[in-house]
Structure formats: C-alpha cells, structure tokens
Image (cartoon, coloured by chain):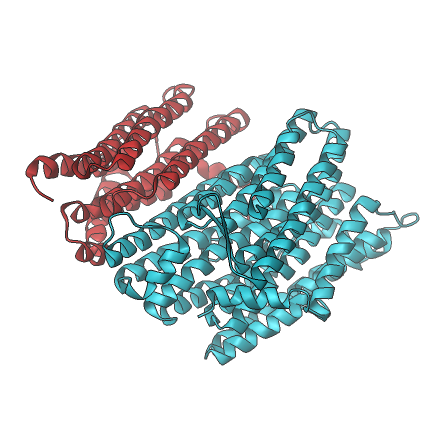
Amino acid sequence: MTGSAYTGPLGLAAGAVLACAVVTLWRRDLRAVVSVLAVQGTALGVTAAALAAHSRDLGLGVTAALVLAAKGLIIPALLRQIVRRDPGSRETAPLVNVPASLLAAAVLIVVAYLASGKITALAPGTAARLAPLGVATVLIGFLMLATRRKAVSAITGLLLIDNGVALTTFLLTAGVPLLVEFGASLDVLLVVVVLRVLATAMRARFGPFDLDQLRELHD
Amino acid sequence: MLIYAVLAVPLAAGAAAAVPWRRWIGWVTAAANGAVLVLGVILATGVTRGHSQAAAGGILRADALSAFMVVVIGAIAVLASCQSVRYLSAETGRGACTARHASLYTMLVQAFVSCMLIAVLAASLGVMWVAVEATTIATTFLVGHRRTDGALEASWKYVVICSVGIALAFLGTVLFYFAALHASGHPAGSLNWTALMAASPRLDPGVVRLAMGLLVLGYGTKVGLAPMHSWLPDAHSQAPAPVSALMSGVLLTVAFYALLRFKAIADGALGPGYPRVLLVAVGLASLAVAASLLITQRDYKRMLAYHSIEHMGLIALGAAAGSPLAIAAVLLHILGHGLAKGVLFLASGEILLAEGTSEIAGVPALLSRRPVLGGIFGFGLVALLGLPPFSLFASELNMLRAEVAAGLGWAAAIALACMAVIFAAVMAHGRHLLLGQAPPQGSPAATPRIVAVPLGAGLLACAFLGVSAWPIQPLLHAAAQVVAS
C-alpha cells in the first residue's frame, strides 16, 4: 500500500461509481440515465484495473477487462435499444420527487459508512477504506427500485445494486476467483437480456406503461 | 466419474431437444432425468459409506448432503418431465404452442435442472451462487411460457426481485470470503466450503454477522421466505404446471441448501445463537403470512404456492434448531414436500387443462366427476397437511421435537398455531374442490394414464417414506452430520 500514484486514481474511480449512482437519481431522461450507467460501468472497470496494476494480479486484470466490456459497453448498448424505441421516455412521475430522492441518497451514504464500520475496521488498507462507496451504491439502487415506475428505471436500480456489490468485492477482496467472476458477469448479462425481452414484450402488449400498472396478480 | 455423469446426462437430453419437438423427445428427457435419480442414488450409497468425492479439479464435490439433494432433484424432475410430455402435447395439439416453442421449453427445463445440480455439486460457494442465479435466468421464460398478461407480469416480478435478492447473497458470500482472507492471511484465498468450514473458528464475528444477515435476506428471497416472498405466489401460479412443480418442489429447497451450508460456517464462527435468531424470525414470518393469506385464497394454484411458503417457514424453523435430529428431519421434509408439492402442482395442471379455470369455486366436486384425478389431489393435500402415513407427518413431528429440545418451544408453539389455521383453511378449500355440490352431469371422466401413473407413484413414494424411512435413513443421518451444529 505505498504511493499516492495508486491511491489517487483508485479513490477517483471508486468515487465516480457512487457519483454516477447519485446522478441516475437526478436525471429523469432515461437516455441520459443509460449513458450514466455506461460511465459507471467504465469507472468500475477502471477501479479493478487500478487494483490489478497495483498488486500485479493477472486474474484481476482479466476481470477488469471483463467488467469494462460487459458493464461499460454491452449492457448499456442493450439498454439503449429499449430506450431508443421509446422516444421521449422519461421518468415523469416518480413516487418520490427528485430533490427528496437526492436527500435520501445523502442519508443512505451516511448509513453506508456507519454500516461498514465493522468491515473497514478489520482491514485498514487504502482499498478497504473505500468499501462504503460500494455499499452506498447498493442502497441507492434499492431507492431507485422502490421509487421509480419505468421498466428501464427498475433495470437501472438492479444494475446499481450489482455494480455496488462488484465495487465492494473489488475493494475488499481484490476480486473473487476468476471462474466465479466470469460466471457472475455472464449471469448479469443474461439477466439484462431477459429483462430486455420482457420489457419489449410488455410494451408490445400494454403500450407505454408504468410498472405500477402491473396489477393483474394480487390477493 | 459419477459426478460428471450426473451433470452430463440431463444436459445431453437438453441438447437433443434442440430438434423440433416430438413426443418421443419428451420421453427421452424423462428417461435422462430418471437416470439422474438412479445416478444420485448410486452416488449417495457411495458417499454414505465412504468419503466425499471430487471432480473437475476440485470445482465439483459431492458429500452426503449434495448426494441427497441430487436424489431429490432427480425424483421431482422425473415426475415433472413425464407431465411435460402431457403439457406440451396438449398445448401443441390445440395450437397454443409451436414445435419450436416446445423444444425451447424442453431445453430450458433441462438447463434449469442442470443448474440446480451444479448448485448442489459445487465445491465453491461462488460457483454455487452462479448456478443459483442461473436458475432464475433459465426459469424466467418458463414462467412466461403461457404468454398471457399475468404470466408476463409474474416473470417480470420474479426476475427483478430474485436478482436483487441474489445480488445481496453475493455480497454476503464476498464478506465471508473477505473474513476468510483476513483470518488466513493468504493472498490467494478460497471460496470452497470445506476451506471456509476449516477456517470458521477464526473468522471475524462482526463481519460474519453482517454476511449471514445478507445471505438470509438474499437466498431467503429465492427460498420464498417472508417478507421476501411476494414474487412466489405469482410465479408459481402462472408457470406451466411441470415448471411450478420443479420450482416449488426443488428450486426453493436448493436455495435453502445454500443457506444450510452458510449456516454451518456461521455456527462455527459465532456459535448457533445468531443464525438461529435470523432463521426463527423469517420462519415464523413465513408461517404467519401463509396462514393469513391461505384463508381467503380463491385460486387453487396460488393456494399451493402459499402452502410452499408455509413449508419453507417450517424448514427454516427446523434448521434453526440445528441438531442432527433436526437437520435429518429438515432433509426428510425437503424430500417429502418436494414429492407431495410436485404431485399437487402436476395434478393442478391437469385440472386446469380439463376444467379451464384455476378458481377453486369453478371446479367443485372433483372426486365424483374425475375420481382418479380428484383422488390424487385429495391424497396430495392430506400429505401436504402433514397427516400420516405420509413422510411429512414424521418430519414435522421430528422438527417440532428438535425445536423443543433446542429451547425453541415457544417458536414451535406459534408454528403449531399457524399450522392449525392453515389446516382449517386448506380443509375448507379442499372440501369444496373435492366434494362440494356437483353440477348435474354424465358419467365420471377418466384420467389419462400418463397423469395417473407417475403421480400415483409419487404419492406412494411419499407414503412409503412415511411408514418406513429405512432405505434413506443412513443417507439422512450422514447428510445431517455434514451441517449439523
């Protein structure tokens, strides 16, 4: 753990992941949200790459490349196709308005720092100290899922949670074994493909729709 | 070798199903899943006598617990794939489903079964996670296979909620890994269950507490434990019957198997107290939710789905007790519930096919109008309500005994009260469905043998295990030793 040459970029990239999460709450234009997700995926990949370069860990380097490809390029491209078919797709009426969401995000970031105390105490390294950024991203993902009503917003929430978990993983453990990382990336990719198919099918059937219109099934 | 065969046979059948669907392909997949059952029994005999087996350079591993789960998966997959032949013949027959759709269905079912097998045979908890997440992907389109509004809505909710849950489970897994890295000091740690078990006394308690909480939330979502259960009644009621049978009968318990593995590590790190509190909380919540929503249920497939939430709650309570007796009872319950719930969902698919409605009010007096089908459904309900001679009676009794012995008598008492409410509610629904006021009509309708024979066999197996569990007693005992505290 020597040298600010490593700490600087690492902190910057990890911070960018959280910043992107906050921006997705702020922007209502879903096309912009998808672009922010691409930036977040790239920042996540850069975080992994910085860790890999520092520890000269080839496996983590491969992981970084995987993340950059999947989360920086492929998944945003898949999402862009949903949004493009739906011009003017905006999160018009979220259940909680944007200023209140941003305020809630600030609270969640504090909660994340409090909740991660036990973890950061165990391994007082540069990387582990940044772990609350990942936890905060997960919590903001939950906020997104709970308060937004468009299908793309729900997918965004899911991806925020996933990116937050991935960031925490990189910072705490310098990456899980490569086989697991590969499987996990593939799973996320397939989940997005599945959700895209479902979103397209629902749009074909219901027209432009909000998720709270789905109420055929209830008790 | 055996482990490879267990995985290769269902995958090969899935690959064979790529050609346009014919009836014989359905029978080929049924035979392949039968082979999984047989191979599972051979594997179980081997590991019960000797030690665990490894394969694929240590990525795969089978101990008695894994082998037991392979047997459970194989048994219910055979029943479901026999019924899939019936479902696909009926759907293609009435033009609701093309041959291409039918082969996609068959391939996805085989992929689903294979993912569950990988999950229980994985040595690494990370690989297990990947496989459990893959089951969600494989089943999403199966849930939506009937392509109605409801099916589409159910599959959306299913994949979103379960993916969130499973992401939390990944975070929990990573925290265990982090604790292990810190405990060992090795730069290259291992996510293998055996390695984590060996390291468990040295894991940091604070981190393990957080991790176990996330895992109960995360895998608990896939198990359908309250309050993370909301996807379950929708998905299980909208999916085609054979898929419901697999999801309710085995997928839920495969996710619970993951929790059992992690609970054993957490027990080592923290002592049994903390995991017990978590499992009792979600277990009792599940029982309460199931009891309150079963009373007013109007749809028989949803009734079965809520019944699954009840049984997962019972299993969670049993696991909370944690003694070898309790775990053996939990495992017997997993098998018995799988068989009984599988049979009931498959029978409900046949009822839906014959009657065209899933409303309880729409299908009165089944016993006089369709004696064989009604009889199967009736005996299935009797099994599921935990009455003798079926194995669920023995396993529920043993779980309650173990809970009292572990000082959880109060929880057992609450569970019994919920079970009494559920018993009354399901009896009322069942009485209408089976007896009720029959509309005037001609002679009773026959039930095709393709339905009656496998389902009857499933019920007989469940009853046989209840009367005498000796064939699997050594296996249950060995499997319980693996994770009991």
Residue A133 in percent (x, y) is at 21, 44
Residue A210 in percent (x, y) is at 44, 34
Examine the rendered structure and indicate whether residue B232 appears above or below residue A199. below
Q: Which chain is red?
A: A
Q: Nearer the viewer, residue A38 or A120?
A: A120
Residue extending furthest right? B443
Examine the rendered structure and indicate whether residue B243 appears above or below residue B219. above
Residue B224 seen from this side: no
Q: Nearer the viewer, residue B81 or B292?
A: B81
Residue A80 in percent (x, y) is at 37, 22
Q: Which chain is cyan?
A: B
Residue B396 position by quadrant:
bottom right
Q: Which quarter of the rendering shows the C terminus of chain B?
A: bottom left
Residue B412 in percent (x, y) is at 52, 75
In this image, A10 relative to A167: left or right? Answer: left
Image point 16% across, 49% down: which residue?
A129
Residue B73 seen from this side: yes
Image point 61% across, 69% down: which residue?
B395
